[in-house]
Amino acid sequence: MKSLKLLLAGVGVVVLAACQSPSGAHSKNSGSAEFTCIAGTLGGAVIGGVLGSTVGGGRGRTVATALGAGAGGYLGNTMGCK
């Protein structure tokens, strides 16, 4: 149980880190761009987590879910923050 909490905390850190956009990525009117960036990150993390949860079983499924959420968050951030 303790390792699951640690894993979930790690996924949270990765998802939040993916919300960071590179400097200069937003213009002065960044309200809409910031929303798109955050929505892409969170949407990617959710989709990646769902896809990752379909792989393996037991602890392997937990790891696949975490990796899927991290990778999905990264890809969603990359696509949303163009």
Image: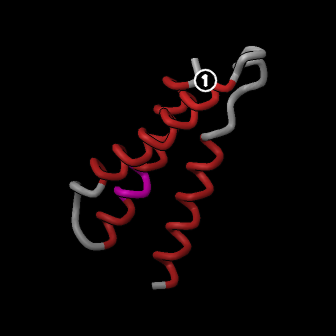
Answer left or right for 23 relative to 63: right
Determine the main secondary structure of the stretch shown in magenta.
helix
Q: Around disc 1, counting alpha carbons within 10 Å, would you say few (fewer than 14), some (14 to 19), or many (20 or more)? A: few
x and y percent of residue 35 in the render? 58, 31
Disc 1 residue type (three-letter): Ser
In this picture, is 66 found above or below 76?
A: below
- Residue 48 in the image: above or below residue 1: above
In what quadrant of the picture does the N terminus appear? bottom left
Q: Which residue is found at the position 57% from the left and 58% from the top?
A: 12
Q: From what the image shows, is residue 67 above or below residue 7?
A: above
Q: Secondary structure at mark 1?
A: helix
Q: Position of residue 58 (x, y in %)?
A: 27, 73
Residue in view at x 42 percent, y 39 percent:
44
In the image, residue 25 lies at what x, y percent? 70, 19
Q: In the image, is residue 58 part of the stretch drawn in magenta?
A: no
Quarter of the rendering containing residue 37: top right
Q: Is residue 70 left or right of residue 65?
A: right
Q: How many marks?
A: 1
The answer to whether residue 70 is above or below residue 60 is above
Q: Which residue, given by chain and number where applicable, does mark 1 sit on? A: 32
Q: Is 29 or 75 nearer to us in this picture?
A: 29
Query: Which quarter shows the C terminus?
Result: top right
Q: Which residues are magenta?
A: 64-68
67 falls in the magenta region:
yes
